[in-house]
Amino acid sequence: MSVHIGAKPGEIADKILLPGDPLRAKYIAENFLEDATCYNEVRGMYGYTGTYKGERISVQGTGMGVPSISIYINELMESYDVKKLIRVGTCGALQKDVQVRDVILASTSTTDSQMNRMVFDHIDFAPTADFSLLKTAYDAGVDKGLNLRVGNVFTSDSFYRDNAMDLFNLLAKYNVLAVEMETTALYTLAAKYNRQALSVLTVSDHILTGEETSSEERQTTFNDMIEVALEAAIED
Ligand SMILES: O=P(O)(O)O[C@H]1O[C@H](CO)[C@@H](O)[C@H]1O
Ligand SMILES: O=c1cc[nH]c(=O)[nH]1
């Protein structure tokens, strides 16, 4: 057991999917994994281990934001030696040509989080996806005929902010594709511990147009994102 994860040693696979929403972890376990068993209910942050195409894989809810996901990633790597970590999350589009329901592979992230300033002081560390995970996920998405985008995402410390459009317009001008709340932490901690990480994101809403996915549509698009992430996770 670690502080926030109730699994016994060996109960978590070395490959893991990381949705922000613990109920998405349950959904993935019930609909995509075989023989899935629940190893964590601490704080309602469900974690499961099962198999996908014969490969052992886990899925763990992380909660929202850099502080929450950082707790789970630290414990998964330090206490359970997880080696491949793939976030499966939602995001809001910042570009006109990024559509609701598109799947984004975050090659890097930009952030207003102070996390890396505390470590690197005046240097701006560039959080980066693992290239082989990114390539495998990209190839899997192309094979499925998905409208995939690859690029920079903004990891925000706030979901609600005053004068948000000023910042979002600036980020859009610099080709940032979308906003979410965890990727910077995932990539930075994976670099620290020399592990592989990738964020696969579904565009759940459009910041510029206000368009949103219906809950039914979200489910279908989430399935595309989950399959892309699972294929990347099991690739050697
Ligand atoms: O759908 P998840 O994975 O939670 O991701 C996005 O949704 C949450 C905000 O609603 C934040 O965690 C953001 O990053
Ligand atoms: O607009 C959005 C959508 C999902 N997640 C976010 O952080 N922002």
Image (cartoon, rainbow, N blue to C red):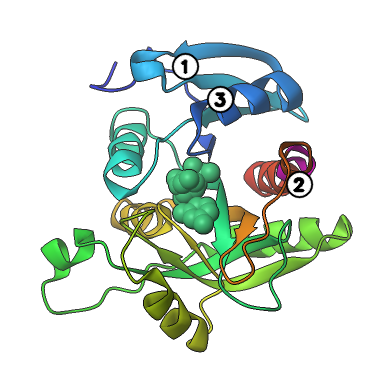
Relative to 77, residue 114 above or below: below
The magenta stretch is: 219-223
Residue 221 bears which disc, if any? 2
Residue closest to the eye, 117 or 166 = 166
Percent position of residue 72, x then y: 34, 35
Q: How would you classify the magenta stretch by its main secondary structure?
A: helix
Crowd band around label 3 with a 10 angstrom C-alpha radius: few (<14), some (14–19), many (20+): some
Please report the residue visible at 66 percent of the width from the left and 46 percent of the height from the top: 229
* Element carrying mark 2: helix
Residue closest to the eye, 205 or 46 = 205
Position of 166 compared to 232: left or right? Answer: left
The answer to whether the residue labelled 2 contacts the one labelled 3, judged by CB atoms less than 8 Å apart, is: no
Question: Residue tagged by mark 1?
Answer: 11
Position of 152 compared to 33: left or right? Answer: left
Crowd band around label 2 with a 10 angstrom C-alpha radius: few (<14), some (14–19), many (20+): many
Does the image show residue 153? yes
Relative to 86, residue 4 above or below: above
Residue type for callout 3: Leu
Query: Which badge, 3 or 1, is on the more N-terminal residue?
Result: 1
Residue type for callout 2: Thr
Position of 222 compared to 93: left or right? Answer: right
Residue 234 bears which disc, if any? none
Percent position of residue 210, x then y: 62, 62
